[in-house]
Amino acid sequence: MMKKVIARPKLIIVLLAILLAVPTIVLAQDDEPDKPITECNPAAQRIVAQFDVTCDDVLEQVNAGYGFGQIMKALYISNSSLSGDDTWQDLLVAQETSGIGWGQYKMALRFEKDGVSAQQLLDWKTSGYGWGQIKKAIAIANVAEDATVDQVLTMMKDDMEWDAIRDALGLPPGKPPWAGNGKFGSNDGPPGLSGAKGQQKGNKQTGPPEWANNDKDTG
């Protein structure tokens, strides 16, 4: 009996020593820097197969901290009307620093049509307007002779209801122009809002990018 009483404290000491050693081992592993990816893995190969980039280009951005999904989205945007003079590498940095989610780029490209550019849509969105407000403002501006979308959005910002906006613009009584015309971007929507599927104009893509339905990023 005496031997068992003596052995228990020794066992407890051993267990405590092991438990105290574990955090030290984990911290040592966390301090090791991640090794750069140097091989053109399958994810990089798929991107190279779809775009005019090299595997070295892709891996450079991966090792800079960007994911393969981010890189693919930036490449799609760089081939759209939203790219301007920016390279896809520029777009990666811009998206990260601006706080504009890839989903907002996707929505802007989805609804670009009939004189309303994706960049203009994105500018309205980043100015604080919702996509629903933008839809309604475009629909109203399409039927009001002297009204611009910006003017209508300002009215909405001032909390004017449809009846007040209609009277201010001299529009006839009746339902608002967006009523019964389907969702924003549907082919049944009012002029300037019908959604077109991805099309190519030269080297520029219009409509939703191919990744539009492959993720749930709406940020």
Image: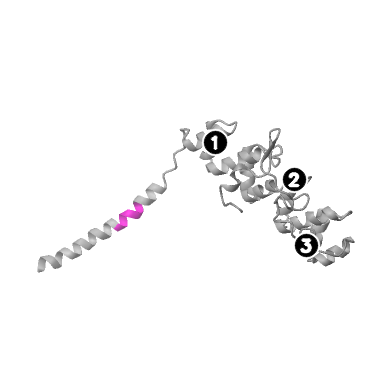
Q: Which residue is mark 1?
A: 47
Q: Quadrant of the N terminus?
A: bottom left
Q: Amino acid at mark 3?
A: Lys
Of tags 1 and 3, the one toward the viewer is 1
Q: Nearer the viewer, residue 150 or 110?
A: 110
Q: Which colour scheme appears in the figure?
A: one colour
Residue 22 covered by magenta stretch: yes
Distance from the alpha carbon under mark 1 to that under mark 2: 28 Å
Foreground residue among 195 and 90: 195
Q: Nearer the viewer, residue 39 or 16?
A: 39
Magenta stretch, main secondary structure, is helix
Nearer the viewer's eye, disc 2 or disc 3?
2
SS assignment at label 2: loop
- How many angstroms separate mark 1 from mark 3 (CA)? 42 Å
Q: Secondary structure at mark 1?
A: helix
- What residue is drawn where x is 56% and y is 47%? 214
Whether residue 74 is visible to the viewer of this picture, yes or no, is yes
Q: Which residue is mark 2?
A: 113
Please name the residue that numbered disc 3 is placed on: 157
Residue 10's x, y, as percent? Answer: 19, 61
Q: Secondary structure at mark 3?
A: helix
Q: Which residues are magenta?
A: 19-24
